[in-house]
Image: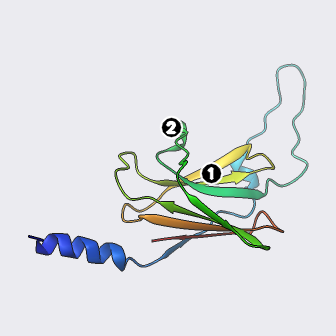
């Protein structure tokens, strides 16, 4: 027999309002601290660190818990990855935004515990155009 709480849980998941998540398009200068080295080398950042990728992870950044299970569809103009994020996720689900051509620097943010699915669409002609929609 299905309880009222079970039905409420199923309905709330089915009708969860979409949450649009936006990674900063460029990594803010104050997010990177460059310091001179002991050997006399002087660091210099010659170009902005632009957004290159986005993906959910199965925990905070120190866990390096990239999620391998997702489906991908491609069109002539975009790539779309869909992630099923239903529990269990004991360390929470986080979104990771990668900056630089090889994601040399990443920003991470914990997502709401009610999120069970994220769809990430990346424009093929402009890597920094990424649309993240989670429910």
Residue at horizontal 55 percent and vertical 57 percent from the top = 70
71 relative position to 126: left or right: left
Residue at horizontal 28 percent and vertical 78 percent from the top = 11
Q: On residue 20, which mark appears? A: none
Say which quadrant the N terminus sits in. bottom left
Q: Are marks 2 and 1 in contact (CB under 8 Å)?
A: no
Element marked by disc 2 = helix
* Residue indicated by mark 1: 107
Earlier along the polypeptide chain: callout 2 or callout 1? 2
Q: Which mark lies nearer to you, 2 or 1?
A: 2
Relative vertical location of residue 42 with respect to residue 45 in this rendering, above or below: above
Q: Quadrant of residue 122?
A: bottom right
Element marked by disc 1 = strand
What colour scheme was applied to this rendering of the protein? Answer: rainbow
16 relative position to 10: left or right: right
Q: Residues within 10 Å of mark 1 (few under 14, many from 20)?
A: some
* Residue indicated by mark 2: 63
- Percent of width and height locating residue 25: 73, 64
Q: Quadrant of residue 66?
A: top right
Residue at horizontal 89 percent and vertical 32 percent from the top = 42
Q: Quadrant of residue 36?
A: top right
Relative vertical location of residue 2 with respect to residue 46 in this rendering, above or below: below
Residue at horizontal 79 percent and vertical 50 percent from the top = 100
């Amino acid at each position: 027999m299905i309880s009222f709480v079970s039905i409420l849980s199923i309905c709330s998941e089915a009708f969860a309002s979409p949450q649009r998540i936006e990674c900063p398009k460029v990594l803010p200068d104050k997010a990177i601290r460059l310091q001179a080295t002991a050997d006399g080398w002087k660091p210099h950042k010659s170009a902005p660190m632009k957004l290159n990728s986005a993906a959910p992870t199965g925990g905070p950044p120190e866990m390096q818990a990239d999620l391998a299970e997702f489906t991908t569809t491609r069109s002539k103009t975009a790539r779309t990855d869909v992630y099923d994020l239903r529990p269990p996720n004991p360390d929470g689900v986080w979104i990771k935004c990668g900056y630089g051509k090889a994601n040399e620097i990443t920003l991470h943010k914990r997502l709401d515990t009610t999120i069970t699915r994220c769809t990430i669409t990346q424009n093929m002609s402009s890597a920094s155009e990424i649309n993240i929609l989670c429910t």
